[in-house]
Amino acid sequence: MLGLPSGVGVGGAAASGASGRKAGGLPCDMLEKLLPRQQSNSGLQRGCGMAGDEEDVPLLPSRDDAAPHGKPAHAPRLPQANLDVFFSRVYRYWQGRGMTAIFISGLLNVLALGFTVAFSAFLLLFVNWRALHADCIIQDTCDIASVAINWQPLSGRSVLSVLLIVMYLAIFGLYWVWTLVYFAVELKEMSQTRHFFRNTLGVGERQVSSMIWAEVVHRIVLVQRTTPLCAERDLNEHDVISRIMRKDNYLIAMVNKGVLAPSVPLPRWLGLGRRRPLLTKTLEWNLRWAMLGHMFDEASHTLRPEFVSDPGRLQARFRAAAVVNLLLSPFLCMFLLIYFFMHNAERFYSHPGQLSSRRWSSLAKWTIRELNEAPHYVDHRLAASHAPASRYIAQFPSHMLVSVCRFIAFVTGSFAALLLLMTFLDETLLERALFGRHLVWWLAAVGVVLTASRALVADEPVAYDPEAVMCELSAVTHHMPRAWRGRAHTREVQRQLSAMFQLKVVQFLDEMAGLVATPYVLYTVMPAAAPRIAAFVRDFTARVDGVGDVCSLAAFDLREHGNTKYGAPCHAPKARRSRQGKLEKSLLTFVATYPTWEPPPEAAAMLAAM
């Protein structure tokens, strides 16, 4: 039997009765029993049309419509030099929901970034923070702007502070210009992609917002009847996704096999262990540049020989990235602090309870994400897992913290009631000072503390059943390490899950600490891992006709990497297998998401045996 909990959920579309699978495949009624329905692939069952569309969609041409000698009668020519880039654009166009939505979203992002840079320049250069405590402002005898705004920003500052501020503005000003240029180039590429959707796939812009990704991929497969995309052979659904996720699949596999496990040492007095795993967004960007960005020859989509034969080059790139990050870290810290303040200050003030909200860490996302799983599918699964993950964390309340929060809520609630009573008796008291602050300030401060303390206290008692909640959680995440089985009630498992499902505040602090720790990780930890990375890439790479070099685990090669404990027909050596049945689970998810895909013989045998 598969080592999966019953009722395994899928972040994509479940198969729903498509009966067109040939012999040797998995009947879709069996898939319905294996994987619960989350999205409907009914559009795939009817061909490629969508019911209820506002636009008339031209049917995809069939082979019978082709002109003699195998050439399409009116098919557009698509000379794509790089199909990886082309399919990635198709995915971004679909994910952006059409040209109009992409333009508006991109324009607003550019404006938001420009406003952040301009606003930070205003705060750093033109605001005299010391003047905010001037006597005339306290006595309300002068205008704040006339005192606090300095129209000669460079006067009275040290040379070092001026140099740092100018460098900060120059760096992020150039970044804003680069973002603007990238946005313009992206619009041009999306315009070409819209032409492909409209004239080749027969999908209008209004349809994109209601079309599932699996149907777009299926249309790409069918359109090759008249419009060849690959010179070697027609591509199927798996080939298209393999090209889009060529690099991401290696990252997923490395995290699964423990090849990529960056961490930083911790002092013993913290009591958090000797090392802490670290995979922040900043570190992920550096890994993409130093490792994934230099792995393939972009023309042939094959591994560069020097990547696997000379780990020293990879070590040199890691160390070069460490130096650049060390130089930029002060400016990045300043920018993130300003952005965090602008983005979250009002939210935390209005809803202090969000301080206790949680979300999955970046490392947890790469751990849970399956091979050949598109980003929006894993986001869907993580969103669906939020409720059971929160319920599992609630199974282990800190009784000491709850008691302290209840006491704080009682005390602050009493003060809040007194202040409200005072203002009810005489509303002019709102403008009077109390211990140097207006009464309005005290009401706001007490309200924030009261709301935050109450958010950490459960309103209703929690039914203690961690094993049942963990089973519900693993049915969505597909993540159940052997050490967790039957031990969901232990503090050890709770701490491990809490490290994956972190408080948002903790995540922000991790990102800030990661700016300081990233140079250390890139200069010491990653160069030491470079030989293992090169060996893994060499040993877990397969060449597929029409696709190029891909991660062999993502190729669903059960003969080479199968594990009979998870239902595979072949049992490979332990060093060649994925951990926790990642390959087999990914295969199930992929078949359920793309029901028109014809799996290879070993995969079909595994599915048929189920």
Image (cartoon, grey):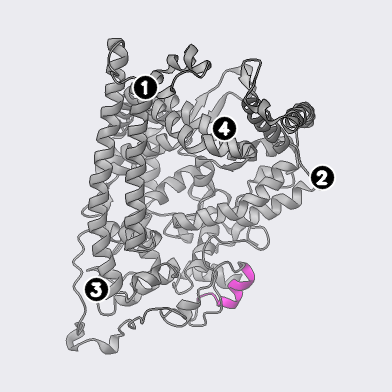
For the C terminus, the quadrant is bottom right
Which comes sooner in the sequence, label 1 or label 3?
1
Label 1 is placed on what type of residue? Ile
Front residue of 232 and 135? 135
Q: CA distance from mark 1 to mark 3?
A: 64 Å
Q: What residue is pinned by disc 4?
A: 506
Q: Residue at x 65, y 39 (%)?
A: 353
Which comes sooner in the sequence, label 4 or label 3?
3
Is there a contact, CB below 8 Å, between mark 4 and mark 2? no
Q: Position of residue 180 (x, y in %)?
A: 26, 45
**Marks 4 and 3: which is nearer the front?**
4
The local crowd at label 4, few if under 14, some if 14 to 19, many if 20 or more residues have their Cα within 10 Å, is some
**Marks 4 and 1: which is nearer the front?**
1
**Marks 3 and 2: which is nearer the front?**
2
- Magenta highlight: main SS: helix
Q: What range of the chain is rendered magenta? A: 25-34
Q: CA distance from mark 3 to mark 2?
A: 61 Å
Q: Is residue 498 above or below residue 572?
A: above
Secondary structure of residue under mark 2: loop
- Which numbered marker is on residue 461? 2
Q: Residue at x 31, y 85 (%)?
A: 62
Q: Position of residue 511 (x, y in %)?
A: 47, 32
Front residue of 485 and 433? 433
Which comes sooner in the sequence, label 4 or label 2?
2
Secondary structure of residue under mark 1: loop
Secondary structure of residue under mark 4: helix
Front residue of 199 and 348? 348
Label 2 is placed on what type of residue? Pro
Q: CA distance from mark 4 to mark 3?
A: 50 Å
Q: CA distance from mark 2 to mark 1?
A: 52 Å
Q: CA distance from mark 4 to mark 2?
A: 26 Å
Q: What residue is pinned by disc 1?
A: 149
